[in-house]
Image (cartoon, rainbow, N blue to C red):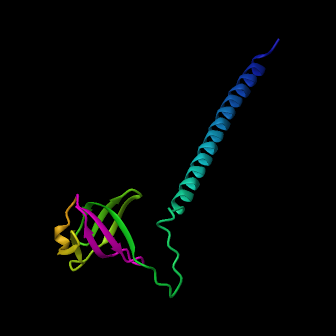
Amino acid sequence: MFNEQKIKAIILIAIIAVVAAGFGVYILKQKKAQTATSQQSQANQSQSNEQPASKQTIVEEGVILPPAEITGKVVGMTSASWIIDQPTGAIEVGIKIDTPVFKNEGSVKKPMSVTDVRAGTEITAKLDSATGAVLEAIIIK
């Protein structure tokens, strides 16, 4: 019934159709993966733009903010900063060698040194709201 050329043509058309369908599926998967990646990166970007209200400070020109106060445990330090762990997360604050440090002993503030603060020390620090530098630290324990 069918001659040899028609059979070869039908087989060739079937092979081309299968390859085209496979290529179409590949393109759809790539687009789906690209869309998912794009949506994930947009979600990550929107999350990174949303900061907790405690960390967002809108400063208008000429407005002086009061010092912020944080309490937490020093979990790390460098020569110019302390990393203080607090319930809302760790924060790195700047220090200087002459930053005033005190320890409350009863009603008396005993002067201490920045070098007396070690990892594991619990402190309350008053921070400069504009720079994040420690203005004064009080050792709790």
Horizontal and vertical percent for residue 73?
28, 59
Magenta span includes 101: no
Report the residue that reaches farthest toward the front.
Answer: 107
In front: 42, or 35?
Answer: 42
Q: Position of residue 75 (x, y in %)?
A: 27, 58
Viewer-proximal residue among 141 and 48: 141
Work out which residue is located at the far bottom of the displayed protein and give it. 62
Q: Which residue is found at the position 59% from the left and 52% from the top?
A: 38
**Looking at the image, which residue is at 31% across and 62% down?**
84
Q: Is residue 117 left or right of residue 127?
A: left
Residue drawn at x 72%, y 25% is 14
Image mark count: 0
Front residue of 2/42: it is 42
Residue appearing at x 34%, y 64% in the figure:
71
Q: Quadrant of the N terminus?
A: top right
From the top left corner, tell me how far across and down residue 118 is, in percent.
19, 63
The residue at the far top in this view is 1
Tell me which corner region of the image, top left, top right, bottom left or bottom right, holds residue 139: bottom left
Q: Which residues are magenta?
A: 120-141
Point out residue 63 in the picture as x, y percentages from the top left corner. Answer: 50, 85
Which quadrant is home to the C terminus?
bottom left
- Magenta residue check for 137: yes
Q: Is residue 104 left or right of residue 24?
A: left
> Is 27 on the left-hand or right-hand side of 52?
right
